Image (tube, rainbow, N blue to C red):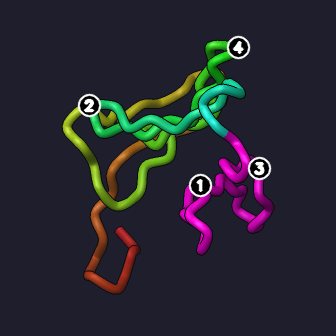
Amino acid sequence: NLTISSNGSLLLSDGKRGVVWSSRGLSASNGFRAELLDSGNLIVKDNVLGKNLWESFEHPGDTLLPLSPLTYNLATGEKRMLTSWKSYTDPSP
């Protein structure tokens, strides 16, 4: 989950509310930054290693943007797909 804290910091947390990364006290000069790409993908980037630490397109929510990928990872078995809900309040197929 990516949230904005009450002091304006970006917080990246796991599913158990543990903070994995925070922008608190960080600046672009230390090699980390959050960037919203033209595609709509929000990334947290480690500029020193040249790697993306987190991408919103890898963690889809309830909105699919035009360039968001729907994939099936054969190595891990992870699926990113759309499913329809039975009703607005019932997520069963």
The answer to whether residue 77 is seen in the rendering is no
Q: CA distance from mark 2 to mark 3?
A: 25 Å
* In the image: residue 37, left or right of residue 38: right
Residue that mark 4 sits on: 49
In the image, what residue type sits under mark 1? Leu
Numbered disc 3: secondary structure? strand
Q: Residue at x 71, y 28 (%)?
A: 30
**Front-most of residues 23 and 83:** 23
Residue 87: x and y, percent? 26, 81
Figure quadrant of the C terminus: bottom left
In the image, what residue type sits under mark 3? Val
In the image, what residue type sits under mark 4? Leu
The tag earlier along the polypeptide, 1 or 2, is 1
Q: Are circles 2 and 3 on residues that touch, CB within 8 Å?
A: no
**Front-most of residues 13 and 71:** 13
The tag earlier along the polypeptide, 3 or 4, is 3
Identify the residue at the far left of this view.
66
The tag earlier along the polypeptide, 1 or 3, is 1
Boundaries of the magenta span = 1-26
Residue 14: x and y, percent? 72, 56
Residue that mark 1 sits on: 10
Residue that mark 3 sits on: 20
Identify the residue at the far bottom of this view.
89
**Which image quadrant is residue 18 in?**
bottom right
Say few, some or many: other residues with alpha carbon within 10 Å of mark 2 (under 14 / 14 to 19 / 20 or more): few
The tag earlier along the polypeptide, 4 or 2, is 2
